[in-house]
Amino acid sequence: MKPLALSQFTATSAIGRGLAETLAALSERRGALAPCAFETVALATCVGEVGQLEAVRLPAALARFECRNHRLALLGLEQDGFSAAVRRCAARRGAARIGVLLGTSTSGMLQTELAYRARTPAGALPPGFDYAATHNPYALADFVRRVLGLEGPAAVISTACSSSAKVFGAAARMIGAGLIDAAVVGGVDSLCLTTLYGFHALQLTAREPCRPFDVARAGISIGEAAAFALLEPLEDVADPEAIRLTGVGESSDAYHMSSPHPDGRGALAAMRQALDSAGLEARQIEYINLHGTGTASNDSAEARAVSTLFGHTVPASSTKGATGHTLGAAGALEAVICALSLRHGLLPGGLNTTAVDPALEVDYLTETRRAPLTRVLSNSFGFGGSNCSLVLERHPGGA
């Protein structure tokens, strides 16, 4: 594929608002998973909750979009000068030439849950409930587009945990086809009762903070996040040290509604395709941000795929032990973490993992390392075997 520059990027999650806080937490090995005290949830599990979202206020003109997911989106857009950078890009290129392609799994589902709680005696939903502007997945792209004043194509991809990784591929194709000149990509997912109780019903939530790739791993910790990047053609970006998207790989297991293929066939296909599109060989990847959910089957399948393609010597880790599994936002959040890793020479050690499962033949990092990085891979694998891998690079002469 033709390389694209991440000319601006940002992330907000339980470990921090913006890049500086996120980098500090990863560098200092500080996680943010805590016993769940969200809403009325009564489950013995830990979550990665973004604090003080209730204090975020939407612009009056966008009041109909009021919901937790959009408050989180707005909070994320306000970090690291991201909104200002997009507006400068729109002034140069034209608002109609910038696309908005975002991922989410549940969008503003919490708003529907609250509406059902407030039904009338006759069973009707309250008159102020606006499904189209809150719970509908497209509402996220509509909201972000309006906040940024953009007029280009907008879409939301909802493929569970690969959602906001796949938007990078969608944007690359649209820019390559000449439909748009640049794209705001990313993902936003917020806590809601359906995901917490749903994953608990599937027996996938851990009581303690999740322990990816640990011999005693017991399930996931759900988190929430908003992460965004501005993608532009590399030749249009003056910064020689800009982080680049050089490869995207997508596949579908079609093996099971919720479980990956046990041998990781779809994951392997996605990683191979990402390397091929970047024109790279496996030996050139210096760090892998694993999907690494902390469930027995997902970690096992991913380990088989990674060891088949890379052997056992490429350093790898999952950052979900710090942030929790942010579901539809995980792909974008971890892409931004990879961009930070490239920029600062950081290989983040996975939190909470104390005894790596010897059956998982991966060079799993339990301690953070510092080393110059040029090429990294980020994996995002969703329900139904919807897989996406991204290759990110920096110029060898970069900082």
Image: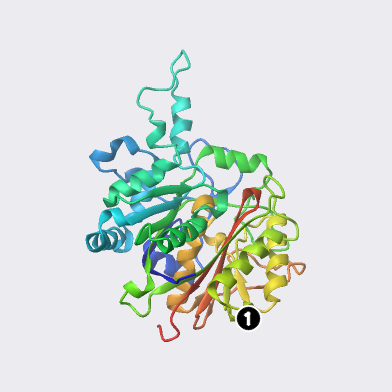
Relative vertical location of residue 369 with respect to residue 226 in this rendering, above or below: below
Q: Nearer the viewer, residue 387 or 350?
A: 387
Q: Residue at x 57, y 37 (%)?
A: 42
Where does the image place residue 301, in percent across and percent down from the top left? 71, 60
The quadrant of the image that shows the C terminus is bottom left
Relative vertical location of residue 122 with respect to residue 50 in this rendering, above or below: above
Q: Quadrant of residue 217?
A: bottom right
Q: Residue at x 44, y 37 (%)?
A: 136
Number of marks in the rendered image:
1
Q: Nearer the viewer, residue 309 or 349?
A: 309
Q: Quadrant of residue 202?
A: top right
In this rendering, position of residue 370 left or right of residue 297? left
Q: Quadrant of residue 162?
A: bottom right
Q: Residue at x 62, y 58 (%)?
A: 251
Amino acid on which the number 1 mark rests in the picture? Arg
* Label 1: element kind: helix
In this rendering, position of residue 142 left or right of residue 278? left
**Residue 184 seen in the figure:** yes
Residue at the far top: name it: 122
Colouring rule applied to residues: rainbow
Relative vertical location of residue 13 with respect to residue 351 in this rendering, above or below: above
Q: Which residue is mark 1?
A: 283
Where does the image place residue 247, in percent across and percent down from the top left? 52, 69
Residue at the far right: name it: 359
Where does the image place residue 213, in percent across and percent down from the top left? 67, 64
Q: Residues within 10 Å of mark 1 (few under 14, many from 20)?
A: few
Relative vertical location of residue 252 with respect to residue 242 in this rendering, above or below: above
Q: Nearer the viewer, residue 205 or 372?
A: 372
In this rendering, position of residue 7 left or right of residue 110? left
